[in-house]
Image (cartoon, coloured by chain):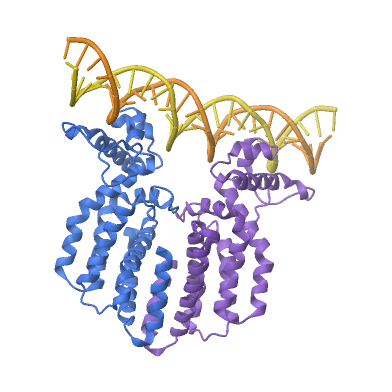
Chain colours: A blue, B purple, C orange, D yellow
DNA sequence: TGTTCAATTTGAACATGTTCAGAAGGAGCA
DNA sequence: TGCTCCTTCTGAACATGTTCAAATTGAACA
């Protein structure tokens, strides 16, 4: 039984349990992921074929589909793994400062840095906006990944020394997560040299975000704040 | 030579010109679009095959690819046509009120109303965020469509009786266009009954948009406004 | 050792978007 | 009528993601 690895977009999912000796038999899955990532980097996502991936992993093509529901699902598995590998660096982010803007900047920077060599790969996931698609960033299948990601923003808020209105605090992580998704989307397709435009986008937008959060406490803007909160609640439904 | 119809995502594009008698020979193209839309509505975009489309249009499959670079491109042609057909109703929007929020509401409502029966179809276009893809809403190939669309927002702003800071006026159409794209994206995948959630989203977000625009004139928020403008300029690059 | 049974693996077959070399059509011209 | 040349159209062939019935494996058990 393959390690579902927190992502439930894999093909079959037989009753999870095991004798006990099957410990390191999940190498097949790993081999497939490794072969896939190699090929994705070599030729790009589209050009790498499932046949090649299977061949390089020394398995039949059917095996790939035993572990992954689709070609896209392999990318998602990669993303899942990435999240775990990034965890330590993301943790570090919190220890150095209590400035929200700076924390957010570092969180995002760590991610972009990590994904630098797989930028085009992530594009495969942007094709699925449909929450009904298992590989969509908005699907139930990816809830765990999403939640884990939002947690970083939750902590960034909790730790920060900014005065953030109570009511806003509840939905701010979602707002920031969405904001981050937008930044990443922009970055994926940023053709500028070294993605300098994204860098600029982050700097400017974070300044705006920080300013808005600060301003959100002003009595004058209370009705505006309530509008935002109400809106976010509508979106999360 | 097929009528490019303002969308340049068609397959071949021989030097545009004509003898003069080829006037109504572009029926083939229309037949293909018609057949495609029929089938898309009957079975959904994915399930409708190019073979079926060609068959229903009484042409070989190659003919479909002579007029359209891809299956998605047919959807784009539909969108292009839709824009023209909606024009009168969108025009009406301006004659009745000078209230910006109301105007925006009506603009969006007209569109969603028009696309009501083809909601799922538009999903085909959301798969292309890459500005390099000809069918992307952000590509150069779709610039005309995009500009035409932004013009409505430009006019809405010009006509409105809201006091809008000069500097903001320049980039507000783009902001509103992006905002509209977000709303439409949400709507496409809105599974709620009759898309009530989208309705709610529009109401609330427009209230927010209007409030923000109004607030943007406050001296206190001038630096914020400048941040926004700077940001938008970065995005359009 | 032999039997059982579920997990794993196989690869041919399938479905469908797309390509492409060539056929058909027809306009202009001699 | 025959020739040329471009547009339009044809459909077999191709590429590739995906499915699935059947084979293999190996642990548990008698």
Whether residue B230 is situated above or below residue D20 in the rendered picture: below
Rendered location of residue B215, percent (x, y) = 44, 84
State the residue in front, B41 or A92.
B41
| Quarter location, residue B152 | bottom right
| Image-based side of A62 in relation to B104, left or right | left
For the point 55% across and 52% down, which residue is it? Answer: B120
Towards the viewer: A116 or A81 = A81
Task: Residue B8: tell me if it is visible.
Answer: no
Residue A233, compared with residue B212, is above or below; it is above
Which residue extends farthest left? A95
In the image, B48: left or right of C6?
A: right
Provide residue D1's location: percent of width, then percent of height: 85, 27
Residues A110 and B42: in front is B42
Residue B230 located left or right of residue C15: left
Number of numbered discs visible in the structure rendering: 0
**Residue depicted at x 57% and y 46%:** B44
Place of residue A14 in the rendered image (x, y in percent of width and height, measured from the top left): 31, 35
- In the rendered image of this protein, does residue B232 appear above or below residue D16? below
Hey, which residue is sitting farthest bottom in the picture?
A: B219
Q: Which corner quadrant holds the C terminus of chain A?
A: bottom left
- Residue at 17% x, 60% y is A91
Image quadrant in which the N terminus of chain A is located: top left
Task: Confirm whether residue A46 shows in the render.
Answer: yes
Residue A143: x percent and y percent? 33, 54
């Amino acid at each position: 039984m393959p390690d579902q690895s927190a992502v439930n977009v894999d093909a079959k999912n037989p009753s999870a349990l095991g004798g006990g000796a099957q410990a390191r038999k999940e190498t097949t899955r790993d081999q497939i992921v490794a072969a896939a990532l190699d090929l994705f980097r070599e030729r790009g996502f589209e050009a790498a074929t499932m046949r090649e991936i299977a061949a390089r992993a020394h398995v039949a093509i059917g095996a790939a589909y035993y572990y992954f529901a689709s070609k896209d699902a392999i990318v998602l598995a990669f993303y899942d793994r990435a999240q775990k590998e990034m965890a330590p660096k993301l943790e570090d982010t919190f220890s150095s400062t209590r400035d929200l803007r700076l924390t957010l900047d570092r969180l995002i920077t760590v991610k972009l840095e990590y994904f630098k060599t797989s930028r085009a790969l992530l594009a495969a996931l942007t094709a699925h906006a449909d929450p009904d698609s298992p590989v969509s960033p908005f699907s139930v299948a990816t809830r765990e990944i999403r939640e884990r990601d939002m947690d970083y923003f939750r902590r960034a808020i909790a730790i920060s020394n900014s005065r953030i209105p109570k009511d806003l605090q509840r939905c701010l992580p979602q707002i920031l997560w969405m904001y981050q998704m937008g930044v990443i989307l922009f970055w994926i397709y940023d053709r500028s040299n070294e993605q300098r435009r994204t860098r600029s986008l982050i700097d400017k937008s974070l300044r705006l975000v920080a300013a808005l959060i600060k301003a959100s406490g002003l009595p004058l803007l209370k009705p505006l704040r309530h509008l935002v909160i109400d809106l976010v609640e509508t979106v999360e439904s």
